[in-house]
Amino acid sequence: MKKALLISTLIVFCMTLCHAQMEIKIQITPTHYDTLKIESFHPDKKQIVSFTQPFGAEVTFKDKQSLQPGFYWIIGDTTKVGSFLISNNKNQKFTVIISEDTVIYQGSVENTRNVEYISHIQGFRRQLAALDQEFASAQASMPQYMLRVLADSLTAKARRINKAQDDYQIAVSKENSGLLLGSIVELARSIPEMPQEYYQNRELYQKFVLEHYFDHFPWNDPRIFKTPIGDDKIKDFCNIIYQLDRKDLDTFVVAALNAARVNEQSLYLFYDKVEKILGSNISPYKVEHTYIKMLQNILSYPNLDENRQRRCSRELGMINKNLEGDQVPNFRIVMGNGDTTSLYDIQCDYMLLYLQHPTCPTCREVRGKMANYPALNSAIAKKNLTVLTVYFEDDAQVWANYLKSSEANSSYLHGWNFDQSIEDNQLYDTRTIPYMFLLDKDKKVIRKDLLYNEIEDYIKQLRLN
């Protein structure tokens, strides 16, 4: 009897293992593709989950493992033809029917509700677009005093539409509480209407937007980071911070990090995303003063894991060097004529310090661009600015070959930090080159990590040309 019970238990266990946890059927008409693919959305492309099948009238994707919660694309060959949401490890058996005009989900209440939600939001947008069109049409024929009356009337109508949309989104979010859809809808809500006078004051407008930017961000739901709407929200925020590049706005980045602390996974996901854009040495959108505040904030998190603690401490130590207003550290160099000197011994009103490797492709590209900058060349010719290129690695032959080449611009000074003190003593953060500083006569930093496309602007601002 015991043996029979054991065998029965093993059969049930094996059947459970063999039973597919994910079974998604996809029907697409009338378009024909060679392959059909399900692919997860993930900002880090290395973590994408993908399943591919030959195309057919009905393609079934099965797997013993459940899909991770998040947003998924349906892709025909290379064309995105549909999508669906996964909120949890359950209920991953449904059918997606895609035609030219509609997408129907059979067996997935959440995705069906998402279709209804999108349709309603499009309706609100059409109403607002109709108001814009009405005003645009009236401008051609209506006198100014009547236009003001019409504008007030249309503004009142727009407020009512926006209020109706927000009420609808609140209701949908509550109805789908606990589901990824609920978080997506909550995130999509608009920020509050700002005071009218803010529209006339750019600084007040910008601060209001940033202050309320994350009002509806569902920090308690890390799944939102695996959706395009969550990812775009963060990227747009970083773009605003980068474009404005003002130290007083760093408080809003810190406020967002503090808000994210309600969920440790959300905190790390948010921090990593923002760091990649605003803090990475290879990012064209790096904002150093913002990154410093980010590092200080994350290092104050009581539960920060040891690996992050070490890495962020090291980052902060590197990035805190040679800030604007600081005097950069001195180092010894041998010049092209064989004379040995130091950075401080080179007397000039302004200096462009260019740390580089002569054969680095990016260094070569930037040197080539600089050679054709009229304002830069004029400033050098008038002796208002000195350009000093510095090679800081240990290869005498590379240095000698550079001096002999046409790439060593004759209007620049060229030096080699022959004793490698820059690297050995970590005087400068040389992880990414070229690395440029604009210095005054006392070798104090005017601009750290100067980009090549900023050179001309700074020269004109300082009237050096």
Image (cartoon, rainbow, N blue to C red):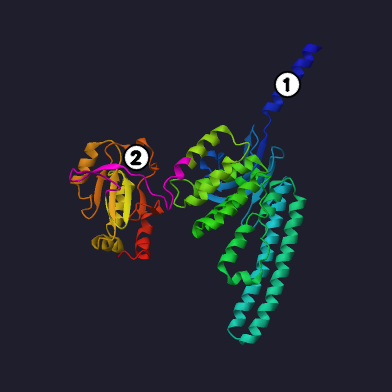
Q: Which is nearer the eye, 269 or 448? A: 448
Q: Where does the magenta region start and end?
A: 317-345
Above-or-below relation of 16 to 268: above
Answer whether residue 56 is visible to the viewer in this image.
no
Please give the residue where the numbered disc 1 appears in the rendered image.
Answer: 11
- For the N terminus, which image quadrant? top right
Dot label at residue 422: 2
Q: Is residue 47 magenta?
A: no
Callout 2: helix, strand or loop?
helix
* Residue in view at x 52 percent, y 42 percent: 45
* Residue in view at x 70 percent, y 78 percent: 153
Q: Is residue 328 magenta?
A: yes
- For the C terminus, which image quadrant? bottom left
Callout 1: helix, strand or loop?
helix
Q: Is residue 31 left or right of residue 171?
A: left
What predominant SS class does the magenta segment belong to? loop
| First reached walking from the N terminus: tag 1 or tag 2 | 1
Q: CA distance from mark 1 to mark 2?
A: 68 Å
Q: Position of residue 190 (x, y in %)?
A: 66, 60
